Amino acid sequence: MTIVLVVAVDAEAAAVGTREGVHVVTAGVGRTNAAIATTLASQKDQVHAVISVGVAGALPGSNLNIGDLIGANFCVYAEEGIETPTGFQDMSSLGFSLGDFSGNDVPCDPHLIQAVQDLVPIGRIATVATCSGTDEAADRIATRTKCVAEAMEGAAVVHTARRLGVPAIEIRAISNTTGNRESQKWDLPAAFSTLQNALPPILDRLMAVNPE
């Protein structure tokens, strides 16, 4: 059995490293690349679980600091819906379904969450196509999704794995703040160091999970 780690870029792949029983896939940035890579990897191997792994930006009000780790209970599509004069409406408000889940919230596998929740804080992570480079945008995503962090691939990875019947979860290290671009704080080395140090015990736990 194999655990597939789906990362976006080579630097994330280098941070997570290699080990027996783990297949690291560098998908490229964004939801389409992530979905394609997850599909191909899940078809090639007898996959035990899929994890969307990488860095993320902390959203306002999250109390997350750069270098912190966060795991998802829900990966939330931030932009699927419609902007109206009275505000944003998600897919369920429009009467459409993205999958076998409610609205824009893609649930991570409960067995995987239970296995790691004492090793990593759990919260909602937004999946965005446009990152929050203004205070207004960051506040809007935080309010709309009730998420603590944003990245660009998680919902697509977990959604795709769910469609294929493979347990999945998203785990991120905080590399930056969101909001006005010129005042953002970044520390990619700190986030990569967190992934390098925190992932081994998490992977040990996930390898022992027997999802029903």
Image: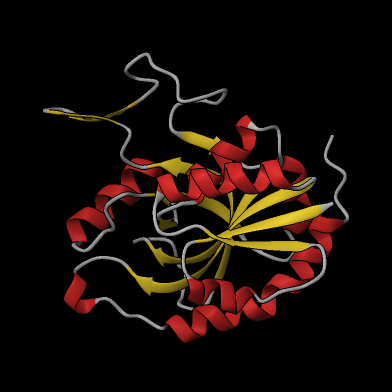
Q: Position of residue 186 (x, y in %)?
A: 35, 80
**Furthest-front residue in this view:** 44
**Furthest-top residue in this view:** 95
Front-most of residues 199 and 117: 199
- Residue 49 vs residue 88: left or right? right
Q: Position of residue 161 (x, y in %)?
A: 62, 39
Q: Position of residue 202 (x, y in %)?
A: 75, 65
Residue drawn at x 64%, y 54% as measured from the top left: 51
Residue drawn at x 54%, y 46% as measured from the top left: 157
Q: Position of residue 1 (x, y in %)?
A: 85, 51
Front-most of residues 46 and 188: 46
Q: How is the image coloured?
A: secondary structure
Q: Quadrant of the C terminus?
A: top right
Looking at the image, is 118 positioned above or below residue 93?
A: below
- Residue 17 vs residue 202: left or right? left
- Residue 211 vs residue 195: left or right? right
Residue drawn at x 77%, y 44% as measured from the top left: 111
Residue drawn at x 45%, y 42% as measured from the top left: 76
Q: Residue 196: which quarter of the image?
A: bottom right
